[in-house]
């Protein structure tokens, strides 16, 4: 197995290479799970997020190039791959918001240098997602079925579209700013020493929140099946 940034690249390449046109949802889930797992295994900094997204898009490119499917089907699978990364990144935004919310609730100010950067990084996550795809499109080789490169037509369709990551980031920033203003009005403030200790552990805190979110989803009970009453 070839691991890079916590991602089994060979498994992702195989997922694409062997996928049929009807397995788009399986591709989306595989990409989502691989991206999320990689994000959980490190401090959730923007630099680490970019590395993970870059690795995933490269694996998708290699798999797409080796696919025997016609171009429209390959493009559809890559669209599902993008959706998988978008879904994982949306969860990362949510984890970042929750971590920042904990700090704001305890009196930390978003005007602190480190928290200002954390807030700015949330807004940059969607850009990081598109940047990884643009880089893959620019560096990808062509194939007989995809002479422009596998990501180029997909990227053209994605341009101008809203992502779950972008929508979640906008909502998160607006909510955090509103809560900060409320905290200032209420006179809530944290001591400098306590504030700095929380700021220094921010990236680690976000990773822990992201892991907790995923564990909670996995442990959530499935909806109970409707009971059927047999006639006697």
Image: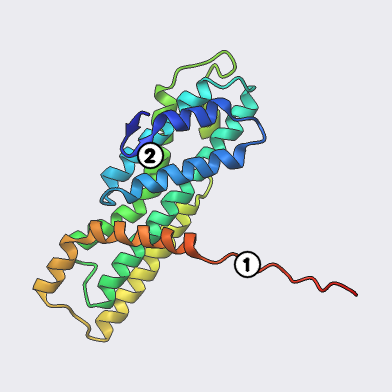
Q: Nearer the viewer, residue 87 or 224?
A: 224
Q: Which mark is residue 223?
A: 1
The quarter of the picture where residue 216 lies is: bottom left
Disc 1 to disc 2, C-alpha distance: 33 Å
Location of residue 101 by image quarter = bottom left
* 38 to 9, vertically: above or below: below
Label 2, secondary structure: give it. helix
Query: Is residue 119 visible in the rendered structure shown here?
Result: no
Q: Nearer the viewer, residue 14 or 147?
A: 14
Res 220 visible: yes
The quarter of the rendered structure image containing the N terminus is top left
Decide: few, some or many residues near mark 1? Use Cα within 10 Å; few <14, some 14-19, many ≥20: few
Picture quarter with the C terminus: bottom right
**Rendered residue at 16%/78% (across/down):** 190
Q: 95 left or right of 76?
A: left
- Tell me residue 85's x, y (percent): 46, 44
Percent position (x, y) of residue 126? 41, 48
Residue sitting at x 89%, y 74%: 231
Q: Residue furthest top?
A: 144
> In the figure, is residue 220 to the left or right of 108?
right
Asked whether the beta carbons under mark 1 and mark 2 sit within 8 Å of each other, the answer is: no
Q: Which of 181 and 68 lies nearest the eye of the viewer?
A: 68
Helix, strand or loop status at disc 1: loop
Asked if 181 appears above or below 125 in the picture, the reply is below
Q: Residue furthest front?
A: 232
Disc number at residue 53? 2
């Amino acid at each position: 197995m070839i691991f890079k940034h916590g991602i089994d690249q060979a498994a992702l390449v195989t997922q694409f290479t062997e996928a049929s046109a009807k397995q788009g949802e399986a591709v989306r889930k595989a990409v989502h799970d691989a991206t999320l797992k990689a994000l959980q295994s490190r401090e959730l900094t923007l630099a680490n997020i970019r590395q993970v997204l870059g690795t995933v898009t490269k694996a998708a490119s290699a798999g797409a190039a080796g696919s025997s499917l016609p171009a429209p089907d390959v493009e559809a699978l890559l669209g599902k791959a993008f959706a998988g990364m978008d879904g994982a990144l949306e969860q990362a935004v949510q984890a970042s918001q929750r971590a920042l919310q904990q700090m704001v609730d305890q009196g930390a100010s978003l005007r602190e240098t480190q928290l200002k950067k954390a807030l700015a990084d949330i807004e940059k996550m969607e850009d990081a997602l598109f940047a990884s795809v643009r880089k893959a499109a620019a560096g990808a080789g062509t194939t007989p079925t995809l002479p422009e490169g596998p990501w180029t037509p997909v990227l053209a369709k994605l341009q101008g579209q809203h992502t779950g990551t972008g929508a979640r980031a906008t909502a998160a920033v607006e909510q955090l700013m509103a809560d900060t203003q409320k905290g200032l009005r209420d006179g809530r403030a944290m001591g400098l020493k306590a504030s700095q200790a929380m700021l220094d552990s921010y990236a680690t805190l976000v990773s822990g929140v992201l892991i907790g979110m995923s564990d909670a989803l996995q442990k959530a009970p499935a909806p109970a099946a409707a009971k059927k009453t047999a006639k006697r």
